[in-house]
Image: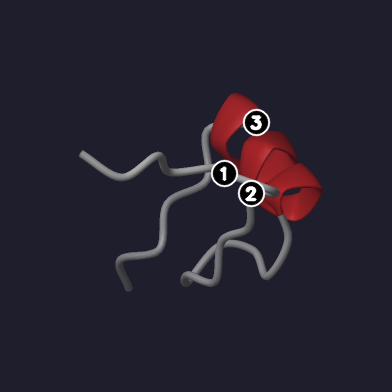
Amino acid sequence: MERVVITGIGVVNAIGNTKEEYWDALASGKNGIG
């Protein structure tokens, strides 16, 4: 079995393009629908 290494985290979605933007929007109750 091969080993897998995760080297970072990132998101691109309707409420943010970085994990910080996403988390801030999510924590303030925003959503990406309409």
Badge 1 marks a residue whose secondary structure is loop
Where is residue 12 shown, x and y percent of the image?
A: 54, 71
How many residues crowd mark 1 within 10 Å: few (<14), some (14–19), many (20+)? Answer: few
Identify the amino acid type marked 1.
Answer: Ile
| Point 42% across, 51% down: residue | 31
Kind of residue sitting beneath label 3: Ser
Taking the spot 66% from the left edge, 37% from the top edge, the residue there is 23
Left or right of 9? Residue 1 is left
| Mark 2 vs 1: CB contact within 8 A | yes
- Give the answer, above or below, for where 21 lies relative to 14: above
Q: Residue at (64%, 49%) from the top-left corner?
A: 9
Question: Real-space Cα distance between discs 2 and 1?
Answer: 8 Å
Callout 2, which amino acid? Answer: Ile
Q: Is residue 11 left or right of residue 20?
A: left
Which residue is found at the position 75% from the left and 52% from the top? Answer: 21
Left or right? Give the position of 15 relative to 23: left
Residue 9: image tag = 2
Pair 3/1: label in front: 1
